[in-house]
Amino acid sequence: MTEQNTPIGGGHAAVPPPAKDPWKGLRGVMAGTLVLQAIVVLLAVPVVWRVGDGITWFSGTYVIGLAVLMILGAGLQGRPWALKYDLTLQVMMIGTFIVSVALGILGLIFAAVWGYILYLRKDLRQRIEAGLLPSQQTRGEQQP
């Protein structure tokens, strides 16, 4: 299921497909968010080390492994399953409550960011289906 090939149906007049890939920008936002999140997680490692019980083999592996998975995920945004991967990473990030409360709170903050990204994705899909993107307009209909 790719966003580019979403069928437009329901008996409505045919809406022309966008001239440019509108999903490319959203994929870039998702990749950038994952990279930013990985940086935040890695910067939180010293906090986890100094606060609480410190870093154990489990907490260190979990946190650093999560950051590596986020960086890898940033390069996978063109795949059809990328959004599920991204959301799984967010669940894992919220799961860092078992390692550090501070990381768990960061997980909740990033979950809100991903909630907004999902809202933007839904809005973009609706605009494509309605033919409201500028690249879907004919030259005579475009406004300056």
Image: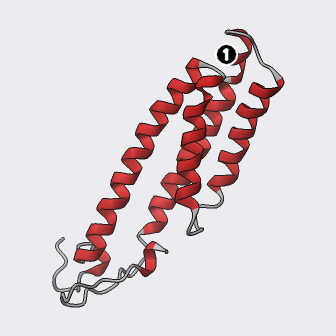
Q: Secondary structure at mark 1?
A: helix
Q: Is residue 9 above or below residue 81?
A: below
Name the residue nearer the viewer: 118 or 57. Answer: 57
**Residue 8 x, y percent position in the rendering:** 30, 83
Amino acid at the residue labelled 1: Val
The residue shown at (58%, 46%) is: 34
At 59% from the left and 45% from the top, the residue drawn is 89
Residue ID at (19%, 90%): 13
The quadrant of the image that shows the C terminus is bottom left
The residue closer to the viewer here, 143 or 94, is 94
For residue 90, which quarter of the picture?
Answer: top right
Residue occupying image coordinates x 58% and y 36%? 93
Q: Quadrant of residue 49?
A: top right
Query: Position of 60 compared to 139: left or right?
Result: right
Q: Position of residue 10 (x, y in %)?
A: 22, 84
Residue 50 sits above or below residue 125 on the image: above
What residue does disc 1 label? 47
